[in-house]
Image (spheres, rainbow, N blue to C red):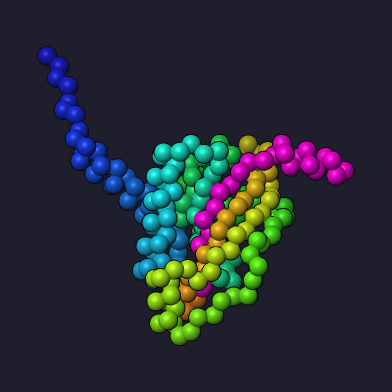
């Protein structure tokens, strides 16, 4: 006689979910090779958790991500890239970690800032910067870019990339750490139509 396994209690379900979220967040943070203050690390982890929960509840027609880099550095790491990226370009988030998202960006990035003041905010001494960061952000810039990505099947897609860039004073390296939380929106048909009208 076959018996059904007992149903998991709500507490057990919550525990399993917490473990899965923790594993996913740890995997994302492993891609960020920057020694950073604990408060910044915690801020990034909390933002990833919020994005993952939001995606679990809402089916938005966009690909959310969180990218991290040091001011002045070329290397950008994605601490979180939505699994929806696969439907946009054919690559999974795990594949993009090894390939590097920047390496599938084709051609120039047409971009602009929406912020009024582009002067870097200086906060000194560093102890004041720590207090300021705990209370809030150093700066918030709204960036928008438009560019092509090379898809896995050899085709390309136009994307609009909209993000808010937050900067933190990272006392561990005496540097500025940039955190970009944004969305990618596939817009090939719209942009190709616009390009056709110009020519």
The answer to which quarter of the image holds residue 3 is top left
Asked whether the viewer can see residue 44, the reply is yes
Residue 151: x percent and y percent? Answer: 63, 41
- Seen from the viewer's position, the closer of residues 143 and 171 is 143
- Residue 163 % position (x, y): 57, 55
Q: Which residue occupies 47% across, 79% down?
A: 174
Query: Which corner quadrant holds the C terminus?
Result: top right
Q: Residue at x 63, y 65 (%)?
A: 115
Q: Point out the stretch of residues depicted in magenta.
A: 176-199
In the image shown, does 4 or 8 lie closer to the viewer? 8
- Please state if 12 lies on the left or on the right of 67 as rendered: left
Residue 90 counted in the magenta span: no
Q: Is residue 30 above or below residue 11?
A: below
Q: Residue furthest bottom?
A: 125
Identify the residue at horizontal 20%, vertical 33% (top origin): 8
- Residue occupying image coordinates x 42% and y 81%: 128
Q: From what the image shows, is residue 180 above or below residue 161?
A: below
Magenta span has 179? yes
Q: Is residue 97 above or below residue 193?
A: below
Specify the quadrant of the image occupied by residue 153: top right
Q: Residue furthest right?
A: 199
The N terminus: image quadrant = top left
């Amino acid at each position: 006689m076959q018996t059904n396994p007992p149903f998991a209690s709500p507490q057990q379900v919550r525990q399993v979910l917490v473990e899965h979220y923790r594993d996913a967040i740890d995997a994302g943070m492993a891609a960020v090779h920057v020694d950073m203050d604990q408060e910044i690390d915690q801020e990034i982890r909390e933002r990833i958790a919020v994005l993952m929960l939001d995606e679990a509840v809402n089916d938005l027609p966009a690909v959310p991500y969180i990218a991290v880099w040091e001011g002045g550095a070329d290397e950008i790491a994605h601490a979180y890239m939505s699994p929806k990226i696969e439907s946009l370009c054919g690559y999974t988030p795990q594949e993009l970690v090894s390939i590097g998202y920047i390496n599938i960006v084709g051609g120039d990035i047409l971009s602009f800032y929406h912020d009024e003041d582009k002067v870097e905010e200086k906060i000194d001494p560093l102890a004041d910067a720590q207090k300021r960061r705990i209370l809030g952000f150093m700066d918030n810039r709204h960036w928008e870019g438009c560019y092509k990505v090379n898809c896995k099947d050899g085709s390309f897609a136009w994307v609009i990339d909209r993000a808010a860039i937050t900067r933190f004073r990272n006392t561990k390296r005496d540097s500025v750490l940039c955190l970009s939380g944004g969305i990618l929106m596939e817009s090939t048909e719209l942009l190709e139509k616009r390009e056709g009208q110009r020519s």
